[in-house]
Image (cartoon, rainbow, N blue to C red):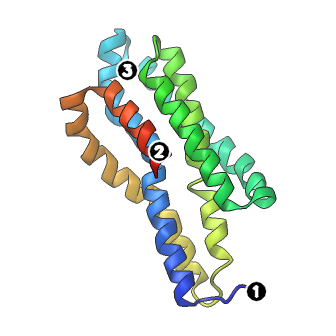
Amino acid sequence: MIQHDRKYSWFRLSVTLAIATIGNVGMWLIIVVMPAIQSEFHIDRADAALPYTLTMIGFAFGNFIIGGFVDRFGIVRVLIAAAVLNAIGLAGAASAPSIAVISGCQFLIGLGNAATFGPLIADVSHWFLKRRGIAVALAASGNYFSGALWPWVLKDVIELQGWRSTYVVLAGLSLAI
């Protein structure tokens, strides 16, 4: 039986916040690499935005679909599968020959990133009664911490190493973490 609002609940919330902050990197990475992709493929801004659009579509579908998988298999197994999906998407985008392939890979990344949002929030809600509102709000904020952190961190890495190398490194980190 779950004991609510205990030290373990707060520890679990802390881990959830870290997973959400790290796990959503692919969603924010595409925003930072958009100018490099635009330049490399000689496309306009609207075409360069297509991968981000498909990331968000994958994220939306993923929150719904992955929620069902969490109900069936549990959050840990789903997070592991999502990390693998993210790694496949990141590695695929790193070697993509066209904007269409990058867009498809970003869709996969969006699906994988979805596991680190809605399903994590739902999981945390089971561990709190008195402080459920703040716990859910903090869990949700992991996505936004990710959006504040990763573009700032990755900007210089992308300038030094290139966007493709950055995707490869993040694919490896997705599997390692």
Marks 3/1: CA–CA distance: 52 Å
Image location (x, y in percent) of residue 42: 34, 9
Q: Do the residues labelled 3 and 1 touch (CB within 8 Å)?
A: no
The residue at which mark 1 appears reads as 1
Sequence-wise, which precedes: disc 3 or disc 1?
1
Residue shown at 37% from the left, 11% from the top = 41
Residue 25 visible here: yes
The residue at which mark 3 appears reads as 45
Mark number for residue 28? none
Image location (x, y in percent) of residue 17: 47, 66
Marks 1/2: CA–CA distance: 32 Å
* Pointer 3 local density, CA inside 10 Å: few below 14, some 14–19, many at least 20: few
**Vertical arrangement, residue 76 with respect to residue 127, above or below:** above
**Callout 1 amino acid:** Met
**Callout 3 amino acid:** Arg
Disc 2 secondary structure class: helix
Disc 3 secondary structure class: helix
Marks 3/2: CA–CA distance: 28 Å
**Callout 2 amino acid:** Ser
In this picture, residue 88 sits left or right of residue 18? right
Residue shown at 19% from the left, 38% from the top = 156
Sequence-wise, which precedes: disc 3 or disc 2?
3
In this picture, residue 108 sits left or right of residue 91? right
Sequence-wise, which precedes: disc 1 or disc 2?
1
The residue at which mark 2 appears reads as 174
